[in-house]
Image (cartoon, helix red, strand yellow):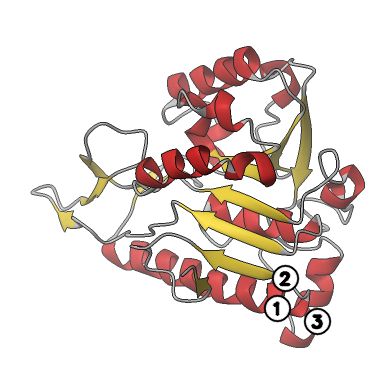
Amino acid sequence: MAWKENFRDYVRRAGPQGEPTAGILLLANGPSLGEELPRLIEAGEHLTHDVLAVNYFAEDERFTVVRPEYYVLSDPTFFRRRCDWERVERLYRTLNERVDWPMTLYVQYYNPDRFDYRAALPNPKIRIVPFHSQVYRGFPSLEFACYRRGWGSGNFGSVIQCGEFVALHLGYKELHLYGVDHTFFDGMCVDERNRLCLRRTYFYDAEPQLKPLQLTSVEPPQPYTVHSYLAEKCELFRGHEVLARYAASLGARIVNHTACSLIDAYERAE
């Protein structure tokens, strides 16, 4: 952190958006959210809880209905003008045009390309707050003490984990997860060119598409091998176990409402 970032706790300095509710809904982009979101809206859960959304949720027509207080972008795709940049630019235009309520956008502090988020998002309703992206690799006895100071992150491999870390750091005591299918192995195959492919689905996609998997955190982007992909997912599921223990140390609960989810670290909703 001393080399790449710093030790300032930007998330806690900025604080929550408005007067926080007791619980917060965290909306991941798994395909199950397509079924869960209408039920949440019909029950008015978005009115009684604060909401955190991630990645391309703003492109859904219900974005302005849910009106999330918080939004998280953590993938290098969002600050590197390379993979899917046209789609990223479209997302920034959408956020600029559609957000007419106070919203905090959390982005990675680590930004080697010096991408100017404020230039891309001049909307004054959007507050931009950086979060640290270094994963803790030290003595286990000091891990949670570092987290409480903002030294570290939930950057274990999924943007929703960064959202969980932010929500815990803001003081929320009940985190309710939706759309966290984490079915990362459905349709996994290797094509005739030895490329690892996956049938990727998100709740906003009409049809799942079989696509080669690219690691975008390196330059230039590299294709995943089966080994590297499985190793990354092992780290991701380890991260959920870490976040579950960290939440318990804070007296908080993380509740998984996604029936088909592969995550086994959190309590399941009845």
Q: In the rendered view, tell whether residue 191 sits above or below residue 269.
A: above
Q: In the rendered view, tell whether residue 35 sits above or below residue 97.
A: below
Which residue has dot 1 on it?
Answer: 248
Name the N-terminal-most of marks 1 and 3.
3
Q: In the rendered view, tell whether residue 178 sits above or below residue 67.
A: below
Q: Nearer the viewer, residue 90 or 265?
A: 265
Disc 1 to disc 3: CB gap under 8 Å: no
Which residue has dot 3 on it?
Answer: 142
Q: Position of residue 225 (x, y in %)?
A: 29, 59
Q: Pointer 3: residues within 10 angstroms few (<14), some, or many (20+)?
A: few
Count all numbered tags in the image, as a single digit: 3
Q: Residue at x 85, y 38 (%)?
A: 18
> Which disc is residue 252 wearing?
2
**Does residue 68 appear to the left or right of 38 in the view shown?**
right
Amino acid type at circle 3 is Leu
Alpha-carbon span between mark 1 and mark 3 = 16 Å
Element class at badge 3: helix
Amino acid type at circle 1 is Ala
Amino acid type at circle 2 is Ala
Q: Position of residue 158 (x, y in %)?
A: 51, 55
**Does residue 177 appear to the left or right of 87 in the view shown?**
right
